[in-house]
Image: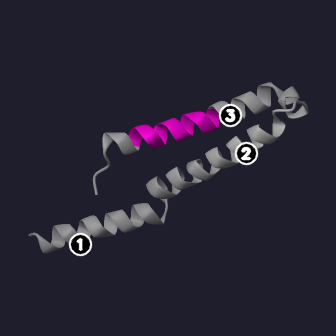
Amino acid sequence: MKLTVGQIVVAALVVIAVGAMVFLFVNNPEVFETQAKEPLMLIAGALIAGFTTVINWFFGSSKGSSDKSAMLYKAMNK
């Protein structure tokens, strides 16, 4: 299965957002002492879930399943 440009862009945005979040939290530890702590933690959790999905798609079982499907398609259409 070939990835579309949209899928690659969304995956890149999720990875960049997680990197930015980690950078923010490491360089501004005082953010944990503000009233924005809870919303930031919710956003961080959502980004981490999205990041996990991206990693699993490109390197996990989804990648293996996609590779298997491509091999079967290739074998059947010789």
| Image quarter (top left, top right, bottom left or bottom right) of the N terminus | bottom left
Q: Which mark is residue 42?
A: 2
Magenta segment's dominant SS is helix
Question: Which residue is painted at 45% across and 53% down in the image?
Answer: 58
- Give the residue type that dot 3 points to: Met
Q: Position of residue 12 (x, y in %)?
A: 47, 38
The numbered dot on residue 21 is 3
Residue hosting label 1:
72
Query: Which of label 1 and label 3 is nearer to you?
Result: 3
Give the crowd class for mark 1: few <14, some 14-19, many >=20 residues within 10 Å: few
CB contact under 8 Å: marks 2 and 3: no
Segment colored magenta? 8-19
- The three-letter amino acid code for the residue at tag 1 is Leu
Quadrant of res 16: top right
Please indicate whether residue 37 sits to the left or right of residue 9 in the image. Answer: right
Label 3, residues with CA under 10 Å away: few <14, some 14-19, many ≥20: some
Calculate the distance from the C-alpha at mark 2 to the C-alpha at mark 1: 41 Å
Residue 21 percent coordinates (x, y): 68, 34
How far apart in space, not on screen, are marks 2 and 3 (Cα)?
A: 12 Å
Residue 61 in percent (x, y) is at 47, 66
11 sits to left or right of 47? left
Asked if 45 appears above or below 15 in the picture, the reply is below
